[in-house]
Image (spheres, helix red, strand yellow):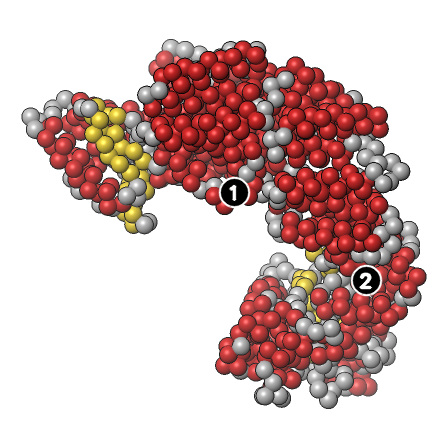
Amino acid sequence: MDFGILGPLQLAREGLPVPLPGRTLPRLLAVLLLDAGNVVSLPRLVDAIWEEAPPATARRQIQNTVATARGLLLEAGTSELETVGEGYRLRVRAEKLDSLRFQRAVRIAREQVDASEPEAALGTLREALGLWRGPALAGLGGRVIEAGALRWNEERAAAEEDRAELELALGTGAAVVPGLRRVLEQHPYRQRSAELLMTALYREGRAPEALDVYESIRGQLDEELGIDPGLRLKEHRTAILREDPALRAAPAPAPHALPAPAQLPADSVHFTGRGSQLASLGALLEPGPRTAVLSGIGGSGKTTLALHWAHLVRERFPDGQLYVNLRGFDRAAPLTPLDAIAGFLRALGVATEAIPSDTEEAAALLRSRLADTATLLVLDNARNSQQVLPLLPATGGSVAVVTSRSRLPDLAAVHDVHRLTVDALGPDESVRLLEGLIGAERVRAEAADAARIADLCGGLPLALRIVGTNLRGQPGTTLAETAAALAGRDRLAHLAVEGDPTTTVAAAFDLSLLALEPEEELLYLTLAFLPGADFSKGLAVALAAWDPEAAEGLLARLVAAHRIDEYRPGRYRFHDLVREYARRKAESGFDGAALQRLREQTVEWYATGSTRLPVEEYRNIVATFLEWNGHRSVSRLLRRLIAFADAGYRDETSLADSLYELPELALVAERGIETGLRSDDPMDGARAYALADAVAYASGKLNRSKYYGEKTLEYLRRTPDGDRTGKARNDLGTTLTQLGRHREAVSILREAVQAADASGERWVRVEVHTSLGTVLRRMGRFPEAEAQMRRARALDAAGPEGPTTVYPLLALSELYVDQGRISAAEDLCRQIADMLRDHPSDYYRSRLYFRQFAVHRADEDHPRAEAALLRGVELAERVNNRRHQLIYQYWLADLYVDSDHLDLAREVLGRLAHLGRYETSESLAIKARVNCRLLTADGDPRQAVRMGRQACDVFAAMPDPLRQARSLNALARAHDRAGTPEAAAACRDQARALFTALGIDPEP
């Protein structure tokens, strides 16, 4: 059951309102929901329901009403109404009560502001305010209910102010004036609302109204409270008075009814889909541009679409419908503009001898005959704008639809046009086209194979029509057989109408290729040879044989000609069938040496073309390695893939969006190892094992990661430089740290530090000093840990661009929390937030929120701690950081145990089973400690003792003395509950000794 108090009282089950009869039940529930989770005394309930005039039977009536409420709630099973002494407590899950959802969202939004995420905060606040349906508990009066409702209304006002401030700061253009006026009407003394309203009005050019707001609140404060506005509001008024800079498309004439030609070819009886394009073409019938250019690759159905729309609207053009095939892409010569004009003029009744022989004169005559008429022109298969422009009508009553394999960009420069791209059909539309061609029953009988055929045809209508035509002529051939043939090595060979060598997909593409200039064809075939689904402008320019400016011009021409598609700025791709066609042309047209040069140029660009991780190239690098593995120099790509596996979810959110796939990288590593074992260059093996290490680490397979890390070092030692920078030893040390083998980790990380310092590689030095400091912190060697982390911080800050990573600051803040230096940790959190403002990373933001959680918890501010940790968990989930998801949620459960929300703690622990493969020694020990505390609170001391011992033993073996001491304290409380005080005292003595040795005040 869902409960609502942010508006009229509302109970709903499965989205349907639950009636609340009588007067007493709604008021009782309202008071209990205002204080959900807390005990409400009987006198307070009596006061809320009857105020000064309670009946003698008030107690009995309340008891009866409680019984009614319990029956209602028991049926829903989402809350508990308990009797506690002389009062009652209603337990409601936070997600079931709108006020608690609102409160949590507002807290999260304020944490997002503190973490420099204003856009995210604004979205959170908008969602929070969307929960409100009116004033809290509207329609229920009385001082008790009104006082409780006032608190929520005040929180709503504050949230409205927060939202308005963010809308103004971000310049979203959203209207904030109405909302702020409502706030001031309900809360007339809120000076912050007045200030924000004045700002919004001023920015809308309504300065007098802004000043009126000031005078209104000033008068109210003076007359009703006897006070003046605050200094901030006064200064804001002055700024407005000073105008402080810091504050800042003709309808078409009616058509004439004239007799007209009707030249449109027949409409397609199998026309399918294209709803959005048909709607866009409908704009030609409205005021505005009256010419449309439909462009797309050969076989995409441009002509079919144009003719279908033309037949739909032909009655809107009583003066005629003209059609011409301009033969722009044809084996015959293109039609000249004069020939096309002459055909139109003859259709319009002009005698042949009256048609001028000069193109410009003929075009002028055509425009004259079309003037003030409602005529539709379909100009099909245009090669270029020069072929089209003389044919276009000049007045608004007529409409022209042009189809071309080119976008005709220069036409748009001199003529108002609607430009529509005719893409491939979607999967469902493709199957529907097949149904129209061969019959719905045949398609439905082999639905999966029909979908496979649609996919193999790439949604290209020409390909689908060819397949449908062949299947219609071969009733004994199954769709499964056709799909298998198309999935073979020569798909294009099967996309041909039997007995008609001219009706093939390849023949359609040949016509497009013939239209290319030599330099366009060279770049086109070069790009088609590349593995991967797409490519960037940078790679295309690097592979071109011309200067960058000329190469970019060629790219633009290929896009305009629909040979490639710029599907987002700077990223290009081929249609699936076009790429297969062009690649075969490249493989047959380039010699072996040219292809190898192309491979080497491509590998060089992928390996060194960007100083930052090229996230958008991840899939292409994987595809390139797998396809070209074994060719000279291709193993260099492994270095990039290692960086992806290392960074994984850290640096780029998009890596988590199904882009970063560990099984795929594991396959790359496996193939790389196979090649490395055969290679004479040990670096091939070292790179492959390093990738396998990174994949295993990110997959939670830490023992495999340790094995691969050791093999990486083995192969590196066969090279002249070895592990020169210490990076491989740092990776192995990090794995050992996660395995809880801290002493081994310290040993190898000290070697890594020496190597890194000797190499002078600043980035590696920052990383290895931080790694060493982290494991020393876990071992309780705080001074040495701090020295390492400060060294890492200083090295990062010493670069010419200043500090570039928050990694050492995050480690240092965790050390400060361990030491109880909360103010210092809080200062570092602010610094980290500042650094992340301009360089957002969800991975590092999630870790920042975890630090903010620790700070708030140390300050005993549990609501803010919960809000920060929930946001950290959300971001860790977004970037697929499984290990941190586990750790953060164990700490969330621990926080709920602190605040006696044991059901929430159990719920958190119960939803983590799917993450078991990512458990580490640390997470297992934290889990055992949380379970110890939870079982103690649940009254199961025997199991609590077992869990507590497990946590203590694991932390002692690492060693991690601070967390061992805290686990000993938890174990002591379990022993107290179990009635073994001597064991409890021993645990506390041991914990006290550990705290003392660490230089930390003993914790209770």
Indicate the secondary structure of the residue bearing disc 2: loop
Closer to the observer: label 1 or label 2? 1
Q: In which quarter of the image is residue 687?
A: top right
On the image, the x and y values in percent for residue 632 come to: 87, 54
Query: Residues under labels 1 and 2: Cα distance?
Result: 43 Å
Indicate the secondary structure of the residue bearing disc 1: helix
Is disc 1 surrounded by few (<14), some (14 to 19) or many (20+) residues within 10 Å? few
Residue at 30 percent across and 41 percent down: it is: 78
Quadrant placement of the N terminus: top left
Q: Quadrant of residue 700?
A: top right
- Looking at the picture, tell me which residue is in the foreground, 566 or 808: 808
Residue at 33 percent across and 26 percent down: it is: 150
Residue at 63 percent across and 75 percent down: it is: 483
On the image, the x and y values in percent for residue 544 come to: 88, 55
Image-based side of 24 in relation to 298, left or right: left
Dot placed on the residue nearer the N-terminal end, 1 or 2: 2
Q: Is residue 255 visible?
A: no
Does 293 appear above or below 853?
Answer: below
Image-based side of 418 in relation to 38, left or right: right
User: The disc labelled 2 sits on which kind of residue?
Assistant: Phe
Image-based side of 202 in relation to 409, left or right: left
Is disc 2 surrounded by few (<14), some (14 to 19) or many (20+) residues within 10 Å? some
Does 135 appear above or below 699?
Answer: above
User: The disc labelled 1 sits on which kind of residue?
Assistant: Gly
**Residue where numbered disc 2 is placed:** 529
On the image, the x and y values in percent for residue 75 come to: 24, 46
- Looking at the picture, tell me which residue is in the foreground, 248 or 750: 750
**Residue where numbered disc 1 is placed:** 916
- Looking at the picture, tell me which residue is in the foreground, 219 or 380: 380
Quadrant placement of the C terminus: top left
Q: Is residue 946 visible?
A: yes
- Looking at the picture, tell me which residue is in the foreground, 401 or 826: 826
